[in-house]
Every structure is written in C-alpha cells, then in structure tokens.
Image: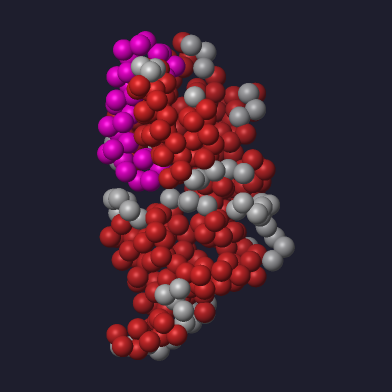
Amino acid sequence: STLHNIANLKAQQGELEDALTLYQQSLQIEESINNVRGKAATVHAIAGIKAQQGELEEALALYQQSLQIEESINNVGGKAATLHNIAQLKAQQGELEEALALYQQSLQIKDSINNVGGKAATLHNIADLKAQQGELEEALALYQQSLQIQESINNVRGKAATINNMGYLEGKRGNKSKQLELYLEAAQILAQIGAYINLHQVLKNLGVTDETKGIIYLAQALWLCLRVQIPLTASVDTIRSMYDMIPKGDEMEALLGTTAVYLCQTRGAQHPQLEELQEQSFKILLAAAVAQGIETQEAFETWYVQQQLNDPEYFIPRLVEKLEEIVGDQWLFERQNNL
C-alpha cells in the first residue's frame, strides 16, 4: 500500500517513530480487508524498526508472527527474508551457531528462487559471523562474493555495507591504509544516496580509526545524531567517542554531556538499556563539571543553569556550531535544509 511505501521511505531516512506510526496504520487497513500477504510484510517491517530501536525480544516475536503467516500462504520469498532477519537478531544476542543455521536455511531458499539480491545480503551476514568467530580469510571471501552480486544488480546500499565491513576486516589484519580507503569509499556511496543511519556508522568507524582526521569524521557523525533519529545507543556512543577525543576542560565537554542526557530524555522511551545510557550520559556531564572545578552539588546546579545546559534551544545549536567549526569545508555529505 501507499502508506507502507511512505513508511519504508521514512525508515530509510531514519525517521523511525514516523515510520512506525504509518506501518501501524497500514497494518489496521490490511487486517480490515484481510490482506494476509500485506500484513506479513508490515509486521516484518515493524519488527525491523523495533530491532533498530534495540527492542530485540519484541522484534523477534514479530518476526516469528510474520514467519507463521508467510508459511501459511506459502510465501517462500518472504519466509527467506524473515529467516534472515531472525538470524540477525540471534547473532546480536550472541547465539552464533543458531544464527548461522538460519542464514544457511535462508540462503538455500534464495538460491532455489533465484533471489540474487537476497543471496548477497545473506552471504554478507554469514561473512559477519565468520569474522566474529575469527575466520577472517573465509569472511573476506564471502564479502567478495556478496560484493560481486551487489555490483551486478547495482545494490548501492548493500555494496556500501559490504565495503565498510571489508574495511573492518582489513583493520583486523593490520592493513590500516586499506581499512581507511574502504571506509571512505563506503561513506561516499552512502552520502550520495542519503542513507544517513548507515552513513553515521561509517563516519564513526572513520572517526575512531583515522589518527589524523578522526575528529573531523566523528564531528560529522555526531552532527547527524542531532539531525536524524540515529538509534540512541549509537548516539550516546558517538558522544562518548567525541568526549574522549577533545582536550580536557574544553567547552564542548559540557555540551556533549548535556546533549547525551537530553537525547536519553527525548528518544529513550521504552529503550531496554535506558538506565545504563542515562548513567553513561550523566557521567560525561559530571566529568565536564569536575574539569571546570565544580565540586559540590550546589555549585553543579548553579553552573548547570549559568551555562544554559538546561536549555536545548541554546546547547543544541551551540554544539552544532562547534561541530561545524571542527569540520570546516571537509564534509563528506551535502547538508540539506531538511537535515
């Protein structure tokens, strides 16, 4: 349906809450007209968003629901896609052997129906698992296989993801210059198609890998966190990396801490790791205060208000300004008005 397609677009652009609302509306319509195939696809898509938001158990339950529907209507392609996604979640939960078995099952189906794009994605994820298990050469061979397919069908987003992961592997093999070259290639591809959530991750990878220009890449990753609904865990992690990179006592420390706390307040509803992320965020803010010589609760409260750290209309634009100063004219993506 049109609603489902608009939701897909919103999800790609990182507007997860908007996408979720549209998917829910789409689901109601599909149920009312008994569109079983449409319902399976929408439940599957909602599961994907829940997974991105860190709600893995809920995502898993939704994928299982989608899988049952697909099996009941003999939607083989849908079944292969859902098995792939369940495998992804199992891998995230550390159940690598189970994940591998599900990926293999998905791969067999995709081979049998000649779903080339799906095959590339599953090969990519099997390579991820092999890399996690330390089988670097095998992982690299699988990435190469996936990359060839993606290039042949012009799957730009998939190609960028595989190039990024190959970069990570090259780093593991001690080949730093190749690692940076691949990360940069992935970032440029993602920037061209406006895939900001994926671009954020690659910029962060560049940020923590490049010893000379790292802060410039990290500043761009953080800039995206303030403009796009980057998942909360990734946003706080980016803020933490930036905090570790700037000089102690810098004005940015307090801006980073209060922004992390603010993101937890505004994006953290129902997040399973919210308490842990709030604690990490507050630690950054507290360390910034200590660096300014603040030692008592009373002094902290006064400083917090004086520095306008309680006012997002001050500290967000101020942090954006500082990030833009760091990047200068070295942006890897176009900053459009809607960003």
* Percent of width and height locating residue 75: 40, 13
Front in this rendered view, residue 20 or 103: 20
Q: Give the range drawn in magenta.
A: 50-79
Q: In this view, does 194 lie above or below 215?
A: above
Q: Residue at x 40, y 33 (%)?
A: 25
Q: Can residue 98 be seen in this view?
A: yes
Q: In this view, does 191 lie to the left or right of 73?
A: right
Quadrant hosting residue 167: top right
Does the magenta run of residues contain 78?
yes
Does the magenta run of residues contain 126?
no
Front in this rendered view, residue 130 or 7: 7
Q: Is residue 247 above or below residue 20?
A: below
Q: In this view, does 304 lie to the left or right of 203?
A: left
Front in this rendered view, residue 134 or 323: 323
Q: Residue at x 45, y 85 (%)?
A: 306
In terms of secondary structure, what is the magenta stretch mainly?
helix
The image shows a total of numbered marks equal to 0
Q: Can residue 124 be seen in this view?
A: no
* Percent of width and height locating residue 218: 56, 60
* Percent of width and height locating residue 245: 51, 69
